[in-house]
Amino acid sequence: AQTVTQSQPEMSVQEAETVTLSCTYDTSESNYYLFWYKQPPSRQMILVIRQEAYKQQNATENRFSVNFQKAAKSFSLKISDSQLGDTAMYFCAFVGDQTGANNLFFGTGTRLTVIP
Amino acid sequence: DTAVSQTPKYLVTQMGNDKSIKCEQNLGHDTMYWYKQDSKKFLKIMFSYNNKELIINETVPNRFSPKSPDKAHLNLHINSLELGDSAVYFCASSLGRARSPNQPQHFGDGTRLSIL
């Protein structure tokens, strides 16, 4: 069974500073995909960044980057130059390549507050 | 040009009633999903459909019945609503596994269901 753990229920960061959100997962699958989703107060679920497990290079999307450590089963999200609009719940998610559908398994989320 | 649309956005009803939530996607995706987000913000897969066929039913009570008239629609019907059904329900879609296993899921804006 897949599990995704986010050990930081809440975090805060000063505007323009950098923050890292942690995520660990457990799986027996050899190939899988990892995602970070953002849920602002508007309730939408917005994809932030994704990583394929077979790629060693860490994914980056503008101010967002990941530190993917496959051996440690760790997938942290770094947000640089934090902006007020980054205030949201952040969910780490996993989908394995072996199951019959792309079912996302989510962590419990980290509530990030960007302080002006 | 909404990609994944759910209706209604809010649903307030009495215990014991039957209600439906509709979902439509115009992205040409093959797979659609229903997720439940509880009061602690935890997101969990309920169902997934691929080309109108049920792929996953994650131990959801049989009071919940998904219906997929075509691959662009996946509606959720709930019978005999209970207090514990209060949650936000998200519809999502993605390209099917056979074509693009790593494609992210696109979410609707959610339906907040409140049982009185």
Image (spheres, coloured by chain):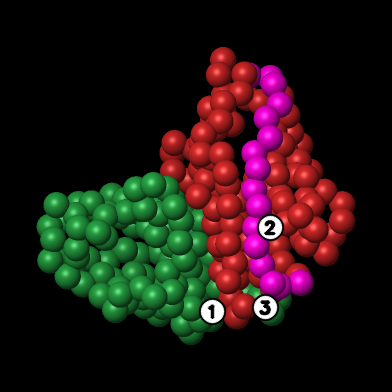
Chain colours: A red, B green
Q: Nearer the viewer, residue B2 or A99?
A: A99
Q: Residue at x 43, y 77 (%)?
A: B57
Question: In the image, which residues are magenta?
Answer: A15-30
Q: How far is mark 2 from mark 1, CA to CA? A: 21 Å
Camera-nearest label, 2 or 1: 2
Outermost bottom residue: B53
The magenta stretch spans residue A18:
yes
Do tags 3 and 1 sit on the same chain?
Answer: no
Query: Is residue B23 at least partly visible in the picture?
Result: yes
Residue on which the image places disc 3: A98
- Secondary structure of the residue carrying numbered label 2: strand
* Residue A9 left/right relative to B64: right
Of the two numbered discs 3 and 2 on the same chain, state the one appearing first in sequence.
Answer: 2
Circle 1 is placed at which residue position? B50
Identify the element where label 1 is drawn. Answer: strand
Give the Cα distance between marks 3 and 2.
14 Å
Mark carried by residue A106: none
Q: For numbered disc 3, what is the local secondary structure? A: loop
Residue of label 2: A34
Residue A74 belongs to the span the image colors magenta: no
Label 2 marks a residue whose chain is A
- Residue kind at label 1, given as amino acid type: Asn
